[in-house]
């Protein structure tokens, strides 16, 4: 097992990894930017090292400085968390070349699965259903138009690299195609330094279902159920839950086996997720694989009782999985709600909910300054219940207890969302935000004036 791990991240995920390492009796080194000097992660770590100014490109994305810090502090491994360098094949390769374990899959796997078009080809060869679309990269609007004509509109033009909703455009007619192609390509180039594009059929208003997998270096692979991530704003998730109200037990087993097949085809080890879109008829299609721990991993942890970060570290150390498929059990229902800051500022007063079935993941404390430099998520509220309705009621109660003074957040909006009939019924898709946010916002404004 590792003696010392460098955590190349910040915020709540840095704390999550720190706590796990503490329980495993592993020392920790946290790297931080000048903006995060007074963060909890810096306070909790065995050692903390400032690696640059607030701008992520000069600190959390500075590969050379992070690697040098790991060498100087004699770290055995680097845990990248999510975001930043977590799916950067170049960084993973540099770790390998420097004799430092990258806690995640190999650089070859990250490269293979990070290129969405390459991943599509691999999945098609492995009998994993993919969304109909281009078999190779699309190099011009004219090529895109010919494929769109063949598979039929509407279509999606998508960046082969990156994620987070960047470099993606919906196209409903031939007249829109050229402009959408060029805009998506320019956005991909600016966001990822890679403007390779491909095209696929647009599955309208699908359900976004991801399967959590764990795999060790000996090829032992298990799936840990699904998470429904369909409530999104601009391709950014707002709420995740498991089990999905859409997926029945037989299909859960089938999709889980498909995810395992996808992971084995990729030569995957570590924690990861295989992402699918599912239409109203229940047909599911592979869209990508996330080769890292996910923001919403606590949903699966609460549902199965399996510590995903611990397993991820054990796998990276060369240990076998601590569980086999027959031992995986899902109990009850779990929902995660993301709390996002809508303004920067100093936390003047803070009260987190607690009580039975409530888990909080956050880096906030009274006096902490929320920076404008990084992702807006400041907390995750994870609730569990025996049934979905019990979990929904527990989430409402938790959101009612939450107090974050000093900044504006989306907490009141998320609270009202849990009362929407479509959410209560579990009959929602990725179109939920687009179709309902104005109505929910109106409810919120009416509540403020009442």
Image (spheres, rainbow, N blue to C red):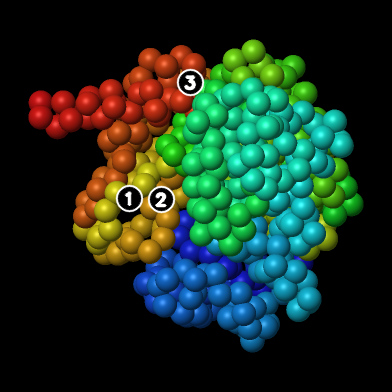
Of the two numbered discs 1 and 2 on the same chain, state the one appearing first in sequence. Answer: 1
In the displayed structure, 166 sits above or below 22; it is above
**Dot 3 crowding, Cα within 10 Å, few <14, some 14–19, many 20+:** many
Image quadrant in which you'd find residue 398? top left
> For this view, does 337 lie left or right of residue 213?
left
User: Does the CB distance between marks 1 and 2 fall below 8 Å?
Assistant: yes
From the viewer's side, name the closer residue of 112 and 386: 112
**Residue 358 pos. (x, y %):** 44, 38
**Alpha-carbon distance for marks 3 and 1?**
25 Å
Image quadrant in which you'd find residue 327? top right
Count the labels in the image.
Answer: 3
Of the two numbered discs 2 and 3 on the same chain, state the one appearing first in sequence. Answer: 2
Who's the residue at 29% across and 49% down the image? 342
The residue labelled by disc 1 is 341
Quarter of the picture containing the C terminus is: top left
Quarter of the picture containing the N terminus is: bottom right
The residue labelled by disc 3 is 428
The residue labelled by disc 2 is 377
Q: Secondary structure at mark 3?
A: loop
> For this view, does 305 lie left or right of residue 187?
right
Who's the residue at 62% across and 58% down the image? 194
**Alpha-carbon distance for marks 2 and 3?**
23 Å
**Residue 182 pos. (x, y %):** 53, 47
**Alpha-carbon distance for marks 1 and 2?**
6 Å
In the displayed structure, 7 sits above or below 325; it is below
In the displayed structure, 81 sits above or below 167; it is below
């Amino acid at each position: 097992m590792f003696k010392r791990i460098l955590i190349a991240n910040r915020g709540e995920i840095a704390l999550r990894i720190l706590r796990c390492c503490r329980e495993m009796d592993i020392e920790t080194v946290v790297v931080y930017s000048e903006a995060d000097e007074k963060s909890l992660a810096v306070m909790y770590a065995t050692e903390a090292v400032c690696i640059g100014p607030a701008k992520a490109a000069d600190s959390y994305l500075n590969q050379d400085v992070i690697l040098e810090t790991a060498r100087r502090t004699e770290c055995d491994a680097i845990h990248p968390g999510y975001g930043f360098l977590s799916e950067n094949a170049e960084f993973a390769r540099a770790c390998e070349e420097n004799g430092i374990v990258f806690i995640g899959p190999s650089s070859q796997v990250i490269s293979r699965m990070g290129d969405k078009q390459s991943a599509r080809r691999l999945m098609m060869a492995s009998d994993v259903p993919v969304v109909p679309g281009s078999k190779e990269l699309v190099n011009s609007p004219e090529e895109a138009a010919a494929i769109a004509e063949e598979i039929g509109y509407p279509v999606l033009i998508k960046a082969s690299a990156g994620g987070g909703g960047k470099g993606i455009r919906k196209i409903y007619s031939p007249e829109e195609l050229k402009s959408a192609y060029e805009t998506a390509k320019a956005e991909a180039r600016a966001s990822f330094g890679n403007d390779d594009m491909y095209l696929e059929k647009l599955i309208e208003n699908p359900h976004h279902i991801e399967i959590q997998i764990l795999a060790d270096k000996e090829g032992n692979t298990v799936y840990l159920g699904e998470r429904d991530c369909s409530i999104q704003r601009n391709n950014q998730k707002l709420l995740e839950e498991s089990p999905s109200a859409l997926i029945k037990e037989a299909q859960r087993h089938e999709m889980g086996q498909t995810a395992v097949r996808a992971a084995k085809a990729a030569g995957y080890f570590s924690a990861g997720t295989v992402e699918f879109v599912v239409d109203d008829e229940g047909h599911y299609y592979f869209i990508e694989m996330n080769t890292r721990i996910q923001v919403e991993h606590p949903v699966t942890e609460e549902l199965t009782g399996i510590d995903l970060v611990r397993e991820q570290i054990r796998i990276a150390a060369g240990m076998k999985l601590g569980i086999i498929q027959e031992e995986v059990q899902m109990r009850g229902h779990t929902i995660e709600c993301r709390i996002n800051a809508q303004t920067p500022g100093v936390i003047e007063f803070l009260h987190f909910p607690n009580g039975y079935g409530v888990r909080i993941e956050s880096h906030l404390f009274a006096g902490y300054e929320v920076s404008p430099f990084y992702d807006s998520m400041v907390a995750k509220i994870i609730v569990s219940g025996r049934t979905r309705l019990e979990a929904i009621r527990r989430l409402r109660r938790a959101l009612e207890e939450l107090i974050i003074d000093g900044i504006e957040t989306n907490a009141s909006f998320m609270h009202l969302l849990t009362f929407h009939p479509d959410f209560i019924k579990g009959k929602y898709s990725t179109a939920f935000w687009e179709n309902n946010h104005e109505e929910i916002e109106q409810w919120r404004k009416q509540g403020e004036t009442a």
